[in-house]
Amino acid sequence: MTAAGRRRRGFTLIELLVVISIITFLIGLLLPALSRAREAARTAACLSNLRQLAVGIGLYLDDQNDGLPAGVMLGPTYRGFTFGGKWVKPTSLLRNGVFAAPKPYERPLNRYVQTGVNLGRPGDPDPVIDAIDLPLFACPSDKSFNYQEAFYAPEAKFGLSDYDAAGTSYSYNVFWSLDSNPREARRRVRSLILTDASRYVSVLDDSAEWALWFHRTNSIPHHGIVDRHSMLFYDGHAGQIDIDPADLITSQYMVVFENNER
């Protein structure tokens, strides 16, 4: 055998291109599946957050004689997001001003769901309050846009998540009680919990609030599926629910949802 014959044969350019093409094809097949798996994990974490919030809401209702953890009234109706969560980022439009978001120690549900966590107190400097993280109120898919700042602007605001802009990815359902006095609101909540708890929404993701309050069909859901939102019901179950913001009855009362857990 000659020296040339004994030399190891290398890959040709064509062979390398074929291998690269095959690898690229396989990656193209796998990436969507990996993306779906990651989003499924985020959705599961989001629904787990809501179920844990349900425990805290139950404790709150028992402790407060069925009073709702609706939070601080900011304007005529703007209070659903103040029921719990952290302080907003310094760049949020809700940091200061007439409708400034409350701090963690001012949000009523926090001490029922984040036991053992320092919620701060009046007089604490900004860096202390800014460092408080309350992950139960953060949807893992809540990334780079929010609707709460839209009360200052006519569209969703990009750059901050709901969690960073409003302190929570979720909103407490106060729509049905807007025309009720506190005593009537408590009576109505107790009646609904006793008679139809599995269909009555207590907490919803922030983009669902936007869709239902403004009847918008073009809301940007946290989990990327149009008109599907994370919902918590008063019996403690949570699910990804398909809603129709054009249905004015559903939008007004927010009690006529089917239990489409996914």
Image (cartoon, rainbow, N blue to C red):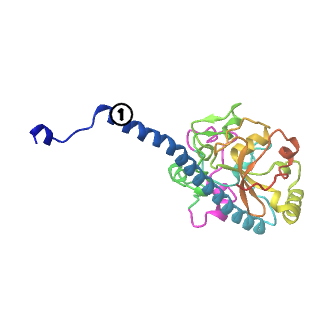
Residue lying at the far front of the rendered structure: 1
- Name the side, left or right, on which 130 lies relative to 157: left
* Amino acid type at mark 1: Leu
- Name the side, left or right, on which 236 lies relative to 26: right
- Name the side, left or right, on which 66 lies relative to 218: right
Which is more toward the observer, 28 or 217?
A: 28
Tell me which corner region of the image, top left, top right, bottom left or bottom right, holds residue 53.
bottom right
Residue in the picture at 57% in, 43% down: 143
Tell me which corner region of the image, top left, top right, bottom left or bottom right, holds residue 146.
top right
Tell me if I can see residue 6 in this picture.
yes
Where is residue 40 drawn, in percent x and y?
60, 52
Tell me if I can see residue 70 in this picture.
no
- Name the side, left or right, on which 181 lies relative to 49: right
Which quadrant of the rendered structure holds the N terminus? top left
Which quadrant of the rendered structure holds the C terminus? bottom right
SS at mark 1?
helix
Which is more toward the observer, 172 or 48?
A: 48
Q: Is residue 188 magenta?
A: no
Which is more toward the observer, 88 or 13?
A: 13
Q: How many marks?
A: 1
Residue that mark 1 sits on:
17
Where is residue 233 drawn, in percent x and y?
77, 58
Magenta-highlighted residues: 89-117
Which is more toward the observer, 212 or 108?
A: 212
Helix, strand or loop for the magenta stretch, by majority: loop
Residue in the picture at 56% in, 51% down: 37
Where is residue 71 drawn, in percent x and y?
73, 53
Where is residue 198 drawn, in percent x and y?
81, 61
Give the class, few, some or many, for how many residues have Cα within 10 Å of label 1's Cα (few <14, many ≥20). few
